[in-house]
Image (spheres, helix red, strand yellow):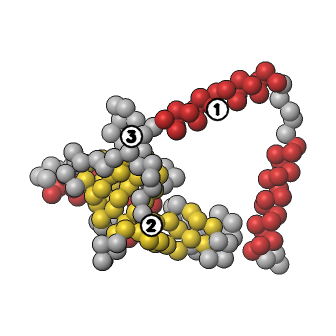
Amino acid sequence: MWSRWGVCLFVALIGLALCLAQEPVSKSVADKASAKSNAVAKDKDDTPKELFSGKVVFLQESLKRRGVKAADEFKAQVVLETDAGELIPVVPDWRGRAFYQDERLRNRRVDLVGSRQKAAPYLQVQMVFVFDEKGIRQYMDYWCDICSIAMYELKPCDCCQEEIRLRFQPQGLPEFVKKKVSK
């Protein structure tokens, strides 16, 4: 029987072998691909990161509190309800999915570091900070105690496939946060 570490090592070796087995591409194709990926990376880096504060809640419940009746299509959509009352939909991507999956993260005070694209109301979350019952800001992720791997959504560990746990760590906000959004 394979140990968990043996399985992780085996998966890593398979990935390395597949990478090494790929045929080399011509220099001009590689240069074009590199230029394109650099342009995409530059675009992503240029998006201003901001601090968004409030509570993440289900959209349908928030609308109901405001006297707006919405059909069940909004039942699973989560939004950040800012301190000023604005509703900002959360993108269910690599970081935002946690709010869709884990009820422990909803209906509690949060600071989210993220960005929004022009002409799109959706918030792409890069960092999640929650406040504990004493009002202390805590950085949030999921942690595998077996593999010592941080993850950002609720699922089995990417390596050993065992359960992971919700982890909170006291941490200040990053220096690169542009400004606090207060609309």
Q: Is residue 17 visible?
A: yes
Residue 161, position as x, y percentages in the image: 65, 69
Q: Residue at 50% x, 65% y: name it.
A: 141
Q: CA distance from mark 1 to mark 2?
A: 32 Å
Q: Secondary structure at mark 1?
A: helix
Q: Residues within 10 Å of mark 3 (few under 14, many from 20)?
A: some
Mark with earlier residue (1, 2) = 1
Q: What amino acid is found at the position of numbered circle 3 in the picture?
A: Arg
Q: CA distance from mark 3 to mark 2?
A: 24 Å
> Relative to 41, is 85 above or below?
below
Q: Residues within 10 Å of mark 1 (few under 14, many from 20)?
A: few
Residue 149, position as x, y percentages in the image: 63, 67
Residue 171 is marked as: 2
Residue 178, position as x, y percentages in the image: 38, 45
Q: CA distance from mark 1 to mark 3?
A: 21 Å
Q: Secondary structure at mark 3?
A: loop
Q: What amino acid is found at the position of numbered circle 1 in the picture?
A: Ser
Q: What amino acid is found at the position of numbered circle 2 in the picture?
A: Gln
Mark with earlier residue (1, 3) = 1
Q: Residue at 35% x, 51% y: name it.
A: 51
Q: Secondary structure at mark 2?
A: loop
Q: Residue at 29% x, 47% y: name it.
A: 181
- In the image, is 4 to the left or to the right of 23? left
Q: Is residue 74 visible?
A: no
Q: Residue at 62% x, 77% y: name it.
A: 145
Image quarter for residue 62? bottom left
Residue pointed to by mark 3: 116
Residue pointed to by mark 1: 37
